[in-house]
Amino acid sequence: MRKGFTLIEAMIVLSIIAILGAVLVPGIVKNMNDARISRAKDDVQTLGKMMLQARDDMGIWTTVNRNNQNSALLIGTSPDPDASAIPLSNTGISSWNRTPMESFWWELVNVNNSYKKIDTNPHNLPSWKGAYLTEIKLDPWGNPYLSNVAYLSNGSTPDNTRKVWIISAGTNNLMDTNFEGTALQTGGDDIGFAIQ
């Protein structure tokens, strides 16, 4: 009666496990990364479409922050965004570390019955009809989604030459797309949805 494996048998089993690991692990890692990219693409499209819906409901772009200043940046995910959460820009890319900032939460999730960021309504605008989303999560790599809303205009002569993005910094956690919106497509591995 045998009581265990011989050394050769144990080495054969370990070799088989190592070979299987070498074959399977890269595929699993690739599938996980593909799933993250797919989720980020879905998220930026959803955020962009909800911002467009809010724009249709309000009659203006929701770019005025709670201090009645034009917001230079929209950032997820909490009501009070943290500037340190913005992914650092790559060398040579115009900085996404801008103020004043506003949160997507106020734009799309705010559960009050009115759009509380605008204290007065001198133009008799249609009302905010949210909430448009129940929550806004960080991107799959743990960073906030961003938008360069500084280039959205509510004036009579809007600057339609800029690309306004809802964007994720992607797998490298660095913004590769220029803040100024002069690029026609996202840079590097950034994942974006153009709302203008």
Image: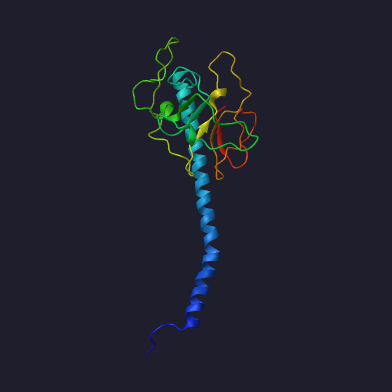
Q: How is the image coloured?
A: rainbow
Specify the quadrant that holds the N terminus. bottom left
Give the percent coordinates (x, y) of residue 76. Answer: 45, 33
In the displayed structure, would residue 23 be above or below residue 175? below
In the displayed structure, would residue 46 be above or below residue 56? below
Q: Residue at x 36, y 20 (%)?
A: 114
**How many discs appear?**
0
Q: Residue furthest front?
A: 84
Specify the quadrant that holds the C terminus. top right
In the displayed structure, would residue 75 be above or below residue 174? above
Q: Residue at x 65, y 35 (%)?
A: 92
Give the percent coordinates (x, y) of residue 120. Answer: 40, 12
In the displayed structure, would residue 182 be above or below residue 153? below
Give the percent coordinates (x, y) of residue 10. Answer: 47, 79
Q: Residue furthest bottom?
A: 1
Comparing 144 with 33, the one in front is: 144
Q: Residue furthest top?
A: 122
Give the percent coordinates (x, y) of residue 14. Answer: 49, 74
The image quadrant that residue 176 belongs to is top right
